[in-house]
Image: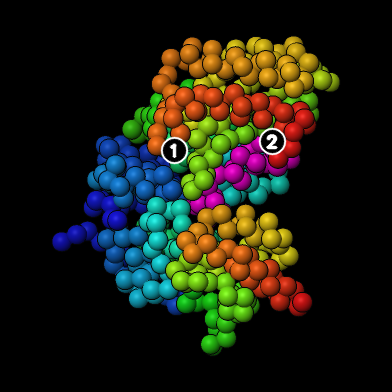
C-alpha cells in the first residue's frame, strides 16, 4: 500500500522544524514513522508536506538531573527500555517502554511520536499520566511545558498547535518509598493496550500515603482515577483493601464523561470489566503481592 | 512528474544512489529498485516481521519506513549475511534444524535471530521467543525456529 503523494522536507534543527511547520500549514512531522506511516498508507492522513525531524540531534538523548528524567522526543522505546539510568531512576518507564509493540517496533518508534499521535491504545499516555510527567513544546514564539494528562485531549487529538513540536518529555525520578507499575491487556498481534492501568503509590511501611492511578485503552484519553486514589490513600494495602479501592473505578469512568471504546476485539462492557482488574494487578505487583 | 528525492543508502556493504518518490517505502526500494527480493512484504501493517531488515545496527520493519529515512544509512538484508557463499551460523542452524516451512517469514526471522544473539550471546528459549514477538510464522513452525536460534547461539559460543 502506498501513501498519497507528498513533498518531503528534512529539518536540520528544532528551529528549522518550527520554521517549516509555520511555512507549511497542515504539514505532518515524521520521527520514527510508526504512527504516521501506517496512517498515511491507509490514507487516513494525507499531508501535502511531511517534515522529517529524525535527524535533529537536539531532540535526542536521555538526561537525569534534579530529580527529573528528561527524555528527548526522538528517544526510541528501545533506548528508554535499555537505559540503565532509566531502569535505576524509574523502573516503570523502562518496563512500559519494553512492553510496547515488538523489538523492531521499539527500535524505531519514539516517545514523542507516540504522544503526538495520541492513540487511545497508547501505553505511554496512560503511564506518563500516572507518573505526573510533562511535555515541553517548542513553537515560533517560544516553548511551553504542560502535563501529559492535559496534553492528550481526546482520541488522536492533543494540545499541540499546528506550528509546535514536542522537544522533551520529563518524568519524575521515583522516591525510595514510591512503587510504580503498569498492567495491560494487550492486543495479541499489535500489543497495543486494549485496557491498561498505571499506578504510583507512596508507601509508609504497608500504608499507602498517596496514590496516582490512570487507566487508558478503553477511553479516548487516559482517565485519572480520583476515587480509586482517594480510597487507596491512608489505607494499609492488602488484597482486600486493593480490591475495594479498584471497585470504585466505575465512578471515575462515569465522572470522566467519556465514551468507553468497544470494537470487534473487545466490547465496551468487557473493557469496563477488565479495567479494575488491570489496576488491581498493577497495585499487587507494585507492593509485591503478585509478580509478573 | 512526481517529485523525487535523491538518496544514497549503503546496502549490504555497497553504496546505492537513486531518486525516489518520498512515499516509496524502504521495502519497495530494496525489492523493486535494488531487486533484493529476499525481504518479503507480509501483513503490510508492521505486525508480521516478514520485512525485517537491519538499519544502522538495529532491526526495523522496512514496510514502516520511507526510503528517504534510510538516506545515509547502513542497511543489511538477508542477501548480505552470507560472505563468499558461506552461510552465517544462524543461517546454517535454520538449515540444520528445519527452521522454515514455506520460507516466507525466514528472511525476517534470520535477521531478528541474528540481532537477538548479538545482544544476548546465550539466550534462553524464552528470551528467543520474546525477541521474536514481532515475527510471525503462519506455518506455526516456531519450535524449530527457536531450536535453530539456540543452536546458532551455541555454535557461536564454540559449543
Nearer to me, A223 or A193:
A193
Provide the residue span drawn in magenta. Answer: A86-110
Mark closest to the chain's N terminus, 1 or 2: 2
Q: CA distance from mark 1 to mark 2?
A: 32 Å
Image quarter (top left, top right, bottom left or bottom right) of the N terminus of chain A = bottom left
Nearer the observer: mark 1 or 2; the answer is 1
Q: Which mark is residue A265?
A: 1
Residue B96 is drawn in which quadrant?
Answer: bottom right
Q: Nearer the viewer, residue B1 or A154?
A: A154
- As drawn, B157 above or below A102: below
Q: Residue at x 49, y 48 (%)?
A: A189
Residue A158 x/y as whole percent: 41, 28
In the image: residue B67, left or right of residue A237: left
Position of residue A221 relative to residue B40, above or below, is: above
* SS state under label 2: loop
Check disc 2 and report the residue beneath it.
Answer: A90
| Chain letter of disc 1 in the image | A
**How would you classify the magenta stretch by its main secondary structure?**
helix
Q: Disc number at residue A15? A: none
User: Could you say where residue A159 lies in the image, as x and y percent from the top left?
Assistant: 41, 26
Relative to B75, does residue A81 appear above or below in the rendering?
above
Q: Are marks 1 and 2 in contact (CB under 8 Å)?
A: no
Could you tell me which chain the residue with mark 2 belongs to?
A
In the rendered image, the quadrant that contains the C terminus of chain A is: top right
Please identify the residue farthest to the left as the structure is shown: B1
The spot of residue A82 in percent (x, y) is 65, 49
Query: Does label 2 lie on the same chain as label 1?
Result: yes
Secondary structure state at the residue bearing disc 1: loop
Q: Residue at x 58, y 75 (%)?
A: B98
Q: Toward the viewer: A183 or A44?
A: A183
Amino acid at each position: 500500500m502506498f501513501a498519497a503523494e507528498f513533498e518531503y522536507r528534512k529539518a536540520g534543527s528544532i528551529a528549522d522544524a518550527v520554521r517549516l511547520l509555520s511555512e507549511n500549514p497542515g504539514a505532518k512531522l515524521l520521527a520514527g514513522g510508526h504512527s504516521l506511516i501506517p496512517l498515511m498508507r491507509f490514507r487516513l492522513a494525507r499531508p501535502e508536506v511531511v517534515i522529517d525531524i529524525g535527524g535533529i540531534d537536539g531532540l535526542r538523548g536521555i538526561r537525569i538531573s534534579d530529580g527529573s528524567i528528561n527524555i528527548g522526543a526522538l528517544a526510541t522505546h528501545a533506548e528508554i527500555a535499555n537505559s540503565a539510568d532509566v531502569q535505576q531512576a524509574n523502573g516503570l518507564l523502562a518496563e512500559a517502554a519494553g512492553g510496547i509493540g515488538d523489538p523492531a517496533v521499539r527500535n524505531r518508534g519514539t516517545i514523542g511520536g507516540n504522544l503526538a499521535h495520541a492513540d487511545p491504545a497508547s501505553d505511554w499516555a496512560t503511564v506518563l499520566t500516572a507518573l505526573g510527567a510533562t511535555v515541553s513544546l517548542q513553537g515560533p514564539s517560544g516553548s511551553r511545558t504542560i502535563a501529559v494528562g492535559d496534553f492528550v485531549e481526546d482520541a488522536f487529538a492533543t494540545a499541540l498547535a499546528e506550528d509546535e513540536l514536542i522537544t522533551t518529555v520529563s518524568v519524575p525520578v521515583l522516591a525510595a518509598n514510591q512503587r510504580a507499575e503498569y498492567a495491560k491487556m494487550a492486543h495479541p498481534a499489535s500489543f497495543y493496550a486494549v485496557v491498561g492501568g498505571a499506578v504510583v503509590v507512596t508507601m509508609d511501611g504497608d500504608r499507602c500515603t498517596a496514590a496516582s492511578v490512570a487507566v487508558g485503552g478503553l477511553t479516548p484519553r487516559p482517565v485519572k482515577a480520583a476515587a480509586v486514589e482517594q480510597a487507596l490513600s491512608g489505607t494499609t494495602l492488602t488484597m482486600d483493601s486493593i480490591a475495594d479501592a479498584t471497585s470504585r473505578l466505575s465512578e471515575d469512568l462515569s465522572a470522566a464523561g467519556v465514551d468507553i471504546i468497544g470494537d470487534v476485539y473487545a466490547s465496551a462492557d468487557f473493557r469496563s470489566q477488565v479495567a479494575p482488574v488491570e489496576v488491581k494487578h498493577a497495585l499487587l505487583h507494585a507492593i509485591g503481592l503478585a509478580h509478573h | 512528474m512526481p517529485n523525487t528525492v535523491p538518496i544514497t543508502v549503503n546496502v549490504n556493504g555497497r553504496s546505492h544512489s537513486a531518486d525516489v518518490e518520498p512515499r516509496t517505502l524502504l521495502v519497495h526500494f530494496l525489492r523493486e529498485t535494488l531487486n533484493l527480493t529476499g525481504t518479503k512484504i507480509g501483513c503490510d501493517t508492521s505486525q508480521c516481521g516478514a520485512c525485517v531488515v537491519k538499519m544502522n545496527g538495529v532491526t526495523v520493519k522496512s514496510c514502516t519506513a520511507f526510503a528517504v529515512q534510510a538516506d545515509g544509512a547502513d542497511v543489511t538484508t538477508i542477501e548480505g549475511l552470507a560472505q563468499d557463499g558461506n552461510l552465517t551460523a544462524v543461517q546454517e542452524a535454520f538449515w540444520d534444524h528445519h527452521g522454515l516451512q514455506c520460507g516466507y517469514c525466514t528472511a525476517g526471522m534470520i535477521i531478528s535471530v541474528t540481532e537477538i544473539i548479538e545482544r544476548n550471546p546465550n539466550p534462553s528459549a524464552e528470551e528467543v521467543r520474546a525477541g521474536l514477538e514481532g515475527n510471525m510464522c503462519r506455518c506455526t513452525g516456531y519450535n524449530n525456529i527457536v531450536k535453530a536460534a539456540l543452536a546458532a547461539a551455541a555454535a557461536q559460543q564454540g559449543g
